Image (tube, rainbow, N blue to C red):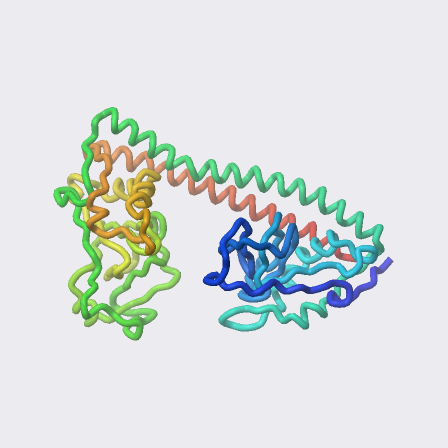
């Protein structure tokens, strides 16, 4: 039997969320959702346990299920059946997930993808008999339940894997305390220098940046946790580079973000393809005396839970997240002899590589489960 089809708007209500402005909102226990994830909180809610669809600023994951009570703003919408005796709400919810690609294709706009509401309401959807709808819902609940359990196990395993390096670092530091390793401060220039970016009159304006050029001018988006991200770059000309006094990076330096996003770091070694690099005013260069302090050891210190905790404590009470040099200078860490540093770096590098491979495998397995989930949804509504 071929199922009849109806336009979505004929059998369903399409209800927009309510506009809410953060500055005039009263915070509370309910999260506010819109076209993406949760943002701030409100003392009111207008939805409970329902599927929402992005209306503005759509991503490929434009359909999502929100559990519990929440506030839906006008960047999202919900879809409800007009008659449960004709169309089950559970069937509608699963159909929305199965139609996610089609819904995303209805987005319009280049800078921001917004849902074309008329086309969304005109989507033709299958309308099988109620008994068939119940069978489909039951079958998908069983299959999706199994997938959800497998995803939960994979995610838990992934989280445990990502904690291994932090746990190993903690063990190393505890061992260092017993061995009475020297405690030094970031401000101790016998071991390292903290170099600020140039903030003078020659600091480049937006008009002086280009997509390519002589010198890469780093922004905080280029510095991640332990590595660089060169997906988006700004360059300045040679003349501008030579007019700046401070902030030039040399091979072997570490870069640490100190404003906005705190504590991200990267190591400028021979693998980085750019010869001329400068930092902006939201970061510092850490230049070690490599006969006493290996930069490869220091980057593990910076990425440790202990250092992150210290930066948060030093920044508590500040409205703008920042780590001034005078504060950074007073933070301490344990320094083993250079031969011990070399052993630690070798051990942690090998462990990091194993963790990376394991994480990639587990993420790949999670993606496979998502694809399986998608195929079950698609097959359920083919008729």
Report the residue that reaches farthest toward the right: 1
Residue 290 visible in the displayed image: yes
Task: Out of 2 and 38, give the one closest to the viewer.
Answer: 38
Name the residue located 72 percent from the left edge and 42 percent from the top edge.
142
Residue 300 visible in the displayed image: no
Name the residue located 77 percent from the left edge and 64 percent from the top edge.
11
Residue 30: image location, x then y, percent: 55, 51
Name the residue located 25 percent from the left edge and 28 percent from the top edge.
177
Name the residue located 22 percent from the left edge and 59 percent from the top edge.
197
Report the residue that reaches farthest toward the bottom: 207
Residue 43: image location, x then y, percent: 54, 53
Residue 201: image location, x then y, percent: 19, 70
For residue 383, which quarter of the picture? bottom right
Report the residue that reaches farthest toward the top: 178
Left/right of residue 136 with respect to residue 303 in the rendered view: right
Residue 333: image location, x then y, percent: 24, 37
For residue 79, which quarter of the picture? bottom right
Number of numbered discs overlaid on the protein picture: 0
Task: Out of 84 and 244, give the one closest to the viewer.
Answer: 84
Left/right of residue 359 with respect to residue 342 in the rendered view: right
Left/right of residue 71 with respect to residue 224 in the rendered view: right
């Amino acid at each position: 039997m071929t199922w009849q089809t109806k336009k979505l708007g004929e059998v369903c209500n399409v209800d927009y969320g309510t506009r809410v402005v953060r500055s005039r909102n009263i915070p509370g226990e309910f999260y506010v959702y819109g076209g993406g994830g949760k943002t701030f909180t409100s003392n009111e809610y207008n939805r409970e346990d329902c599927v929402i669809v992005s209306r503005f600023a759509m991503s490929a994951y434009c359909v999502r299920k929100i559990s519990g009570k929440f506030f839906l703003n006008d960047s999202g919408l919900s879809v409800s059946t007009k008659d449960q005796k004709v169309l089950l709400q559970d069937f509608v919810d699963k159909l929305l997930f199965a139609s996610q690609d089609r819904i995303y294709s209805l987005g319009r706009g280049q800078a921001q993808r917004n849902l074309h509401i008329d086309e969304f309401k005109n989507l033709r959807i299958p309308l099988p008999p109620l008994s068939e709808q119940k069978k489909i819902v039951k079958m998908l609940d069983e299959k999706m339940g199994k997938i959800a359990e497998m995803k939960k196990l994979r995610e838990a395993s992934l989280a445990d894997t990502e904690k291994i390096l932090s746990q190993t670092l903690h063990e190393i530091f505890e061992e260092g305390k017993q061995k009475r390793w020297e405690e030094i401060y970031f401000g101790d220039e016998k071991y390292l220098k903290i170099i600020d970016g140039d903030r003078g009159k020659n600091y480049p304006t937006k008009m002086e940046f280009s997509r390519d050029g002589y010198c890469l001018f780093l922004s905080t988006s280029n510095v991640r946790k332990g590595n660089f991200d060169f997906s988006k770059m700004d360059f300045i000309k040679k003349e501008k580079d030579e007019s700046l006094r401070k902030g030039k990076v040399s091979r072997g330096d570490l870069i640490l973000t100190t404003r906005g996003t705190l504590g991200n770091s990267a190591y400028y070694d021979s693998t980085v393809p750019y010869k001329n690099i400068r930092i902006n005013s939201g970061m510092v260069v850490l230049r070690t005396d490599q006969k006493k302090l290996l930069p490869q050891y220091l980057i593990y210190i910076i990425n440790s839970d202990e250092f992150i905790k210290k930066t948060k404590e030093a920044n508590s009470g500040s409205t703008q997240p920042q780590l001034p040099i005078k504060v950074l200078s007073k933070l301490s860490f344990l320094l083993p002899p250079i031969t011990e540093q070399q052993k630690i770096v070798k051990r942690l590098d090998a462990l990091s590589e194993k963790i990376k491979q394991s994480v990639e495998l587990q993420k790949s397995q999670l993606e496979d489960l998502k694809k399986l989930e998608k195929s079950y949804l698609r097959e359920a509504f083919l008729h």
